[in-house]
Amino acid sequence: MNTIAERIYDYLKGFPPFNLLTKEQLLSVSKSVDVIYLENNKFLFEIGQPIANHFYVVRDGAIGLFRANNSLVDKCDEGDIFGLRALLRKGEYKLNAKAIEESIIYSISLENLEAYITSNADASQFLMASFASNIRAKNTEEEDFVETLQNSSEYAYLQTADYSKNPITCSINTCIKDAAYIMTETHVGSIIIVDDKKPIGIITDKDLRTKIATGKHSINDTVSCIMSSPVITYPETITIAEAQIAMLKHKITHLCITKDGTNNSELTGILSEHDIIVIRENNASALIKEIKRSRSAEQLKDIRQRSEKLLARYLEQDIPIDFISRLISAINDTITQRIIEFSIAKMDTKPPVQFAWLAIGSQGRQEQLLMTDQDNALVFEDVDEGKYNITKSYFLKLSDYINIDLETVGFKLCPAQMMANNPKWCKSVMEWSQQFNSWITTPDQDNLMLCTIFFDYEHVYGDKKLVNQLSESIFKSIDSYDIFLNYLGRNALLNPPPLSFFRQFLVEDDGEHKDQFDIKARAMMPLVDAARLLILSHKIKNINNTLERYEKLMELEPQNKDTFLFCIEAYKNLLTFRTTQGLRHNDSGRFIDLESLDKGNRLHLKRSFKAIKEVQELIKVRFKLSQLL
């Protein structure tokens, strides 16, 4: 072995997964490693470049991985591996890799990955673990929704793969001609040969090309002559990352899915390389790209319907509800942004002044997972009195286009007309400031109700400075009328934990939903209202999401950490439960038939009610409300 290879061997053997290889395996890898020297600030690869057939290990120095805006995603120090996920994903690089100090890099080829690393069980297991730890660590950071989407395509590697659950099969005595006919009729590229429902071999389109079309075998031979055997099998819980590594390791394009993951149990599905490509194209990141390329509201409707399938898949795979919520909200926001662009193009002229579109209510809190009613508002720049009417007329017409297209996509028009095409909710900055001040200084029941809706607003499109001005004016009004928070606190206590004296669920007494449980009004909104009130009392701006509000409150009030953690757990459970019910019944999930719930679900709901009780007790004491109730 040459001196350079010896040095590489001595270095790599100190780091996983190389220390998990046999000496012979690592020696073979070391002999074919390319050594790359990079001066400070020099790029190894850049966004948009085709992904090289290599991954990399830092020998000396440090490599920074940067987004297009030059924000640092990760710093790779000595012994760190990078470029592996890109290698498995294929396509183009999505990050820049740049030396942040003078560096030496080891470049290791895909062939070495296949031959020595993924073929070693311990090393392969390490790669899987590194996928998980790397992605999960990133999801604990504060990220804006664009960063979340970038990470979502990586998070997808940990999802259970969505394999075909109706594999096409035949017996070992089937002739090749009949097998090819079955494949043609069923429009599939593979057929599994089974014996007593257990997979024993596979034929793919490639086999027909290379073994039949070339004349090596007759179409009248049996499938046993050309099938690949034994097949590679995995359990139904296989993740996308495991599937990709398995296909690399065995140089195949299909995996058989069986009940226990071995070829001695019943075949339940098949997973192809094409399936993995489809999964990648149906994650949140891919849908966002499609939205931005869309040309009509009808196209957006199809994408939004696909996002519901994505939502269902995420729930089935137990991906955290807060992560799901952010992704679906980002999709909703991007759809709205595209619709606004369509609508501006329909207008005779460009907007006369700056404006901003606001999502309010559940979408303003980034919690609108299902296709519920739309709630929105518009704020435009202050103008001279002489230009006011024509300016407002412009934005009302624009809002009408937007609301109609949102309805086309699937977001129903709000029955209460809380939409930007209503003159009440399409105002200048000054008018909005006056409106909020009026609600705050005259806190009757109607005004408090409007505050609970409009305080949860989120900038979706347009000039964010207008929204910031609005936020400043709201806090100024609250400061000048501080008893408002007491009124808001009393309002937050109007829905106590929804259990009767006999510990039974409080249900609707009459109407369309008689005897059903209103999970939104009776369980979710008390937690939403409490979080809003407490975060406002700390004068915290721009945190609208309920879970994020409680997380911030834990930081601000460590003495109440246990209560806020309880509220986070409860709200996640309620949000998951409502979303699951809505998908199951193809509705908003708001009203639940208690008879359909098992004992476990009832207990989970009742536990959530205890969180409501705890946080409401805290509010009573904080705002001295016991005597007002």
Image (spheres, rainbow, N blue to C red):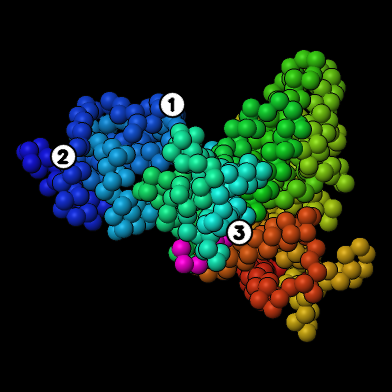
Q: Which mark is first along the chain, 2 or 1?
A: 2
Q: Amino acid at mark 3?
A: Glu
Which residue does the numbered mark 2 point to in the structure image?
31
Distance from the alpha carbon under mark 2 to that under mark 3: 45 Å
Q: Are marks 1 and 2 in contact (CB under 8 Å)?
A: no
Bin the neighbour count of mark 1 within 10 Å (Cα to Cα): few under 14, some 14-19, many 20 and up.
few
The residue range painted magenta reads 263-270
In front here: 436 or 123? 123
Of the residues shown, which amino acid type is indicated by label 2? Answer: Lys
The N terminus lies in which quarter of the figure?
top left
* Quadrant in the picture for the C terminus: bottom right
Q: Which residue is mark 3?
A: 316
The Cα atoms of the two marked residues, 1 and 3, are separated by: 34 Å
Query: SS at mark 1?
Result: loop
Q: What residue appears at the point 51 percent right and 47 percent down from the top-left corner?
A: 221
275 to the left or right of 5: right
Name the residue: 74% across, 59% down. Answer: 584
Reading the image, the residue beneath label 1 is: 48
**Quick one: 377 or 504, which is closer to the camera?**
504
Q: Which mark is residue 60?
A: none
Between residue 347 and residue 426, name the one nearer to us: 347
Few, some or many residues within 10 Å of mark 2 (<14, 14–19, 20+): some
- Amino acid type of the residue tagged 1 in the rendering: Gly
